[in-house]
Image: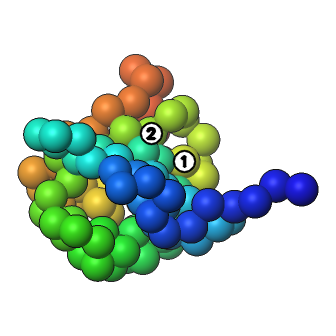
Amino acid sequence: MKIQARGEVHPRVTVIGRPICPAYVIRGDSATMMIEAGVNFMGPLFKRDLDNIGGGSAAVDFLFVTHSHWDHLGSMPYLKREIPSVRVGAHRAVPPLLE
């Protein structure tokens, strides 16, 4: 049986979103990274969850998606608009999909 992570799973790692479409916020000493951007309609939920955890959405420095499937990068454009300072990272095949 698989147990789904929710909320803070470590003092530096928090799971946000929903269990079916999670994202992971990792806080380092000098920067914070969000991994995955879920499906497009998850953007406002991710933003709300980021605002509710320590530092808020403005504290997210990097947004990284693991690959180019729609369920991993869908809300990236929304999050980039809402958090203009966030730097995004992904495989080189991802940018054309977001244009």
Q: Which mark is residue 72?
A: 1
Front residue of 62/81: it is 62
Q: Quadrant of the N terminus?
A: bottom right
Front residue of 8/74: it is 8
Distance from the alpha carbon under mark 1 to that under mark 2: 6 Å
Front residue of 20/94: it is 20
Helix or strand or loop: what does disc 1 sit on? helix
Task: Tell me where residue 45 appears, x and y as whole percent.
Answer: 42, 76
Say what amino acid the circle numbered 1 marks. Answer: His
Q: Is residue 26 above or below residue 47?
A: above
The residue at 44%/54% (across/down) is: 10
Front residue of 17/42: it is 17
Tally of numbered tags: 2
Q: Is residue 3 above or below residue 65?
A: below
Helix or strand or loop: what does disc 2 sit on? loop
Left or right: 66 in relation to 54: right
Say what amino acid the circle numbered 2 marks. Answer: Val
The residue at 34%/51% (across/down) is: 12
> What residue is disc 2 on?
65
Tell whether label 2 touches label 1 (CB within 8 Å).
yes
The residue at 15%/58% (across/down) is: 59
